[in-house]
Amino acid sequence: MASIYLTIVNITCNASHGTQESMVFFVLSFPCETAVWKTLPSIRAALARALIVRGLAQRRVAELLATTEATISHYQKRKRGNAVKLEGDILEAIDTLADELTASKIPTEEVRERICRLCNKATKTTVIC
């Protein structure tokens, strides 16, 4: 059975008479949408930060994660990739992957597969607010 998440969206806008109005919407979303928009960026951000702490350059981290240096910079500054608080075995797996990436060459496809497995696990076990 597929899970469906309820996302609460609060939109504040300027009303025509100079005041602000706030509207709350409830949006149903599928776990894969949550994974793409919240979980995956949080995992990539944590992995990027772990790789940089281990001495890899932003450019190399961007290559490994198949993204841009600007995205890695945003991850470092915590401007992106903070929607999900990763804990426990997910963080341990990210640290292990970071260690392996800095110690040797892991094929790009394997990196992607391992990130996908982490994302699947995190999506099933993490509460997203």
Image (cartoon, rainbow, N blue to C red):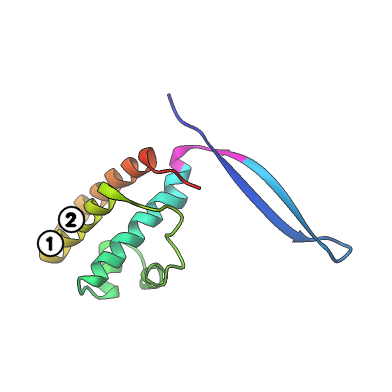
**Residue 68 in the image, given as x and y percentages of width and height:** 37, 69
State whether residue 38 is above or below residue 80: above
Neighbour tally class for label 2: few under 14, some 14-19, many 20 plus, Cα within 10 Å: few
Q: Which residue is depicted at the point 40% across and 53% down?
A: 85
**Residue 45 in the image, given as x and y percentages of width and height:** 35, 61
State the SS at label 2: helix
Determine if the magenta segment contains residue 31.
Answer: yes
- The one of 92 and 114 positioned closer to us in this rendering: 92
Structural distance between the alpha carbons of marks 2 and 1: 14 Å
> Which label sits on residue 96?
2
> Which label sits on residue 105?
1
State whether residue 49 is above or below residue 125: below
Q: Is residue 124 left or right of residue 54?
A: right
Q: Is residue 3 left or right of residue 106?
A: right
Neighbour tally class for label 1: few under 14, some 14-19, many 20 plus, Cα within 10 Å: few
Report the magenta residues as a range. Answer: 27-32
